[in-house]
Image (cartoon, rainbow, N blue to C red):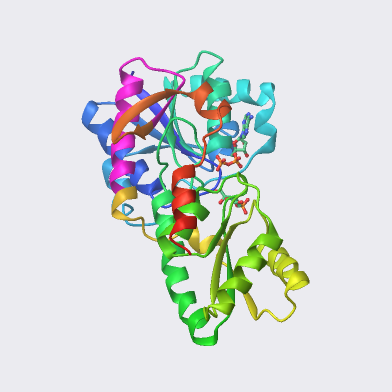
Amino acid sequence: MKRIALLTSGGDASGMNAAIRSVVRVGYVRGVEVIGVYSGYKGLLNADFHPLLPRDVSGILERGGTILRTSRVPEFKEKENQLKAIENLKAAEIEGLIVIGGNGSQSGNYALSETGFPTIGIASTIDNDLWGTDYTIGFDTAVNTAINAIDKIRDAAVSHGRTFIVEVMGREAGFIALDAGLGGGADFILVPEIPFNIEKIVENMREAFRKNKMHHLIVCAEGAIHGRDLEKEIKKYMPEADTRVSVLGYIQRGGPPTRFDRILASQLGEHAVDALLGGEKGKLVGIKDNKITLIPLKDAVTKRKTLNEELYRLAEEVSV
Ligand code: ADP
Ligand code: F6P
């Protein structure tokens, strides 16, 4: 392979730039030309291709976001657009493609690989919801940002004896909520994967008040219930509760990546290039049991990654 393309797609995640840097520089070392595709699948459809050299990726390791930009392109689900993308790649004499992104982006990547074109995915989403990999690039940074925020919010919760609801990202998955909740010492963690009962939460809060614990921290994933809706529900049963809601939002997606995300991104970038050059196709590069691993894209996007229920149970135990 002499020329490969690289794009970032879907929600941005801290560490995407570190992965871009790794792909470009490892590609250079291996003697393969790396072409950057701008704005994800939109750039594939418009043939927005630009060669990337090692100096083009200087000073990006520590930056959040993606220098290649990203997009959401619903029409990429249509077969004719996928074929158009392959046509554009072939016309530019590109022989392989690396897609950095999350579940949706890797579904698009899988569709491209089904046409026979060699593609490899790099697992990157703050949601950590790709099957077969323990971690995705951006998740660690997002969780650390959320924990940092929770540590600060706790000050007001304790000082005023308030109930704080902290809403974190995770439209379909509770990985951020679980880790941020356990790591931030939340009293209750609400995730889309596990049913919850508001009356039971209020009952536990009343019991805590009786024992003179006046503050509470509740972490909820946006996909389980929105913070404002949860506040309304709690007030139905406990109108006297002094509640406040903090929606953390996009601060979780941006900013400098953690040490973990920088190293993971660098490793996944290297392995993605080597996988393509080694003749692999239709695979996602991820990490399992501390080893970089290749997962069939089909499995990564069709199987549902489950939450670590032991961690959830532990979070309940340590919040008595
Ligand atoms: P993420 O990759 O962060 O999960 P999205 O779910 O928004 O983000 O997906 C990013 C893009 O991937 C979509 O805008 C679309 O272009 C493409 N995509 C998502 N699902 C599919 C699919 N089933 N087939 C083809 N392309 C898809
Ligand atoms: O990247 C995944 C994610 O952060 C989800 O958890 C969240 O719901 C979604 O992206 C929101 O992204 P946007 O507003 O860019 O569509």
Q: Quadrant of the N terminus?
A: top left
The spot of residue 135 in percent (x, y) is 40, 41
The spot of residue 50 in percent (x, y) is 43, 38
> What is the chief secondary structure element of the magenta stretch?
helix
* Closer-to-camera residue (248/16): 248
Decide: is 40 above or below 222: above
Q: Which residue shows up at 71% across the image and 69% down it?
A: 234
Decide: is 140 above or below 162: above
**Residue 280 placement, left or right of 12:** left
* Closer-to-camera residue (2/157): 157
Decide: is 35 above or below 216: above
The spot of residue 221 in percent (x, y) is 59, 55
Please tell me in which quadrant of the rendered image residue 292 appears.
Answer: top left
**Residue 182 placement, left or right of 290:** right
* Closer-to-camera residue (219/283): 219
* Residue 282 magenta-highlighted: yes
* Residue 199 magenta-highlighted: no
Q: Is residue 2 in view? A: no
The spot of residue 257 in percent (x, y) is 36, 55
The quadrant of the picture showing ligand 1 is top right
Tally of numbered discs: 0
* Closer-to-camera residue (124/243): 243
The residue sitting at the bottom extreme is 160
Q: Is residue 200 in view? A: yes
The residue sitting at the left extreme is 29
Q: Which residue shows up at 59% across the image and 51% down it?
A: 191
Q: Which residues are magenta?
A: 262-285
